[in-house]
Image (cartoon, helix red, strand yellow):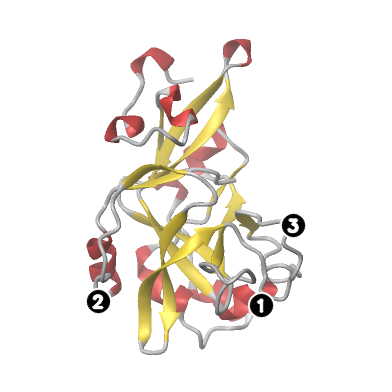
Amino acid sequence: MCGRFERHTPLSAFAEWLGIAPPDAVVPACYNIPPGTAVPVAVAGEDGPRLTMANWGFRPDDVDDPGAPRPINARAEKVASSRYFARAFREARCLVPADGWYEWRAGPGGVRQPWHLDVGAPLMFAAVHVPGGDAGGALPGMAIITEPARGAARRIHPRMPVILDPSCWRAWLDPALNARERIRAAVRPVPGEQLRLWPVSTRVNSPRNDAPGLIERDPSAGDG
């Protein structure tokens, strides 16, 4: 799964790579982003891709129950057919700018050790957002798509976020692609060989902590 991530690369850099205008407002870096947070996302606009904000947690706009689930992840194997996500997969795919994410693995004595994972460069998670806005009238919700873990990530958790190769970022956002087979034929994830990981301080356990040191290797934790 993906339940915590971080972004420290300026959004202006992601905008440049997408070939779009930079955001109007500066969104500061955050080294510890939990679910429920408003985060920058790239979406398809009327005149091409644009950067906007979305809330990490997804509830379809046709669900009126305020107590309905707000999943933070959507499984790649089911996102195109799920009652919750199918429309968003067809009509409202988005990209989540990031630099890495965290996973936890039980260590000696049952202590959960956090790990930082990345691909050695800024990245984009494949995601879906609520078309047109959330049912509650707030920021639209979004969910990060996950897949079975690949490469080094398999050491830590059975699943990982779908990280799209930069060459297909714009294709993922293309509203003209709305059939499952065409979408999946047009995009591909980064190679599993690019994945890197290392143990980090348990300070990341608390979302209140937000500092560059959270992504640094914790030498006292070993390499698992």
> Which secondary structure, mark 1?
helix
Amino acid on which disc 1 is placed:
Arg
Give the SS element for disc 2: loop
Nearest to the eye among marks 3 and 2: give it.
Answer: 3
Q: Which mark is residue 87?
A: 1
Q: Position of residue 96 (x, y in %)?
A: 43, 60
Q: Which numbered disc flags the more N-terminal residue, 1 or 3? A: 3
Q: Image point 29% across, 30% down: which residue? A: 213
Q: Residue at x 54, y 67 (%)?
A: 138
Residue 150 image-quadrant placement? top right
- Circle on res. 67: 3
Mark 3 → mark 2, Cα distance in angstroms = 37 Å
Q: Secondary structure at mark 3?
A: loop
Q: Quadrant of residue 87?
A: bottom right
Mark before the other along the chain sequence, 3 or 2: 2
Percent from the top left, x then y, of residue 115?
46, 31
Residue 170's place in the image compared with 114, above or below, is: below
Question: Amino acid under label 3?
Answer: Gly
Distance between mark 1 and mark 2 Cα atoms: 27 Å
Picture coordinates of residue 118 (x, y %)?
A: 39, 43
Task: Give the side of residue 127 with respect to residue 171, left or right.
Answer: right
Q: Earlier in the sequence, mark 1 or mark 2?
A: 2
Which of the image's four quarters has the N terminus? top right
Q: Which mark is residue 21?
A: 2
Identified by mark 2, the residue type is: Ala
Kindly check if marks 1 and 2 are in contact, taking CB atoms under 8 A apart as contact. no
Q: Residues within 10 Å of mark 1 (few under 14, many from 20)?
A: many
